[in-house]
Image: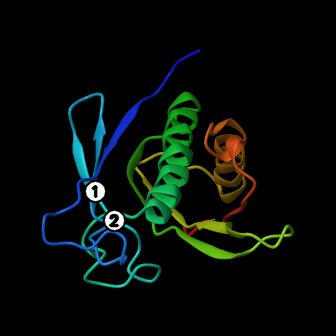
Amino acid sequence: MATYTATIRWTLNADEDFRGLRYSRAHDWEFDGGLTVPASPSPSIVPAPWSEAANVDPEEAFVAALSSCHMLFFLSEAASEGYDVTHYEDRADGVMRKNAAGKIAMTKVTLRPDARYGSHAPSREVVEALHHRAHEMCFIANSVQSDIITDIVN
């Protein structure tokens, strides 16, 4: 169907000790549209100064990718059903734990979508159905083993 690319770029700084593990893990993600995103391991995994808390870490990106994919399908489904979504916010989070195989993994992601509507708002049942369809259609959700919970705010 399609191929997606990203270039991940890291360089050792001259004053760092690679073998001694005293080097910055900050790096860049470059995407085909030209956007470069500063990335780093999570400071909870690699402490400062070897990580950059302000940069996006892979675990945050994983949660954001699931949330974004869900939202995009939700918006499409809502529009197809004739509902005017005027605002959408999701304060999603992910939990890392040991999985059934004993490996550290993102075992659960909770989406908390809060959609607002114009004059024609759907019923709670319709909102739940729209979110269910969005989840079923989301390519990212279909690609992972994590439990994905949708805790609808509004």
In the figure, residue 98 lies in which quadrant?
bottom right
Q: Amino acid at mark 2?
A: Ser
Q: In the visual, does 77 lie left or right of 42?
A: right
In the figure, residue 54 lies in which quadrant?
bottom left
Q: Are marks 2 and 1 in contact (CB under 8 Å)?
A: yes
Question: Tag 1 or tag 2, which sits nearer the N-term?
Answer: 1
Residue situated furthest right in the rendering:
100
* Applied colour scheme: rainbow
> Which residue is at the front of the view, 40 or 143?
40
Work out which quarter of the rendered image holds the N terminus and state it: top right
Q: Position of residue 59 (x, y in %)?
A: 50, 64
| Residue at 65%, 50% in the rendered image | 131
> Which residue is at the front of the view, 72 or 45?
45
In the figure, residue 140 lies in which quadrant?
top right
Q: Which residue is mark 1?
A: 27
> Which residue is at the front of the view, 78 or 46?
46
Q: Around disc 1, counting alpha carbons within 10 Å, would you say few (fewer than 14), some (14 to 19), or many (20 or more)?
A: many
| Residue at 55%, 38% in the rendered image | 73
Give the CA distance from mark 2 to mark 1: 6 Å
Q: Secondary structure at mark 1?
A: strand
Which of the labelled discs sits on residue 40, or is there none?
2
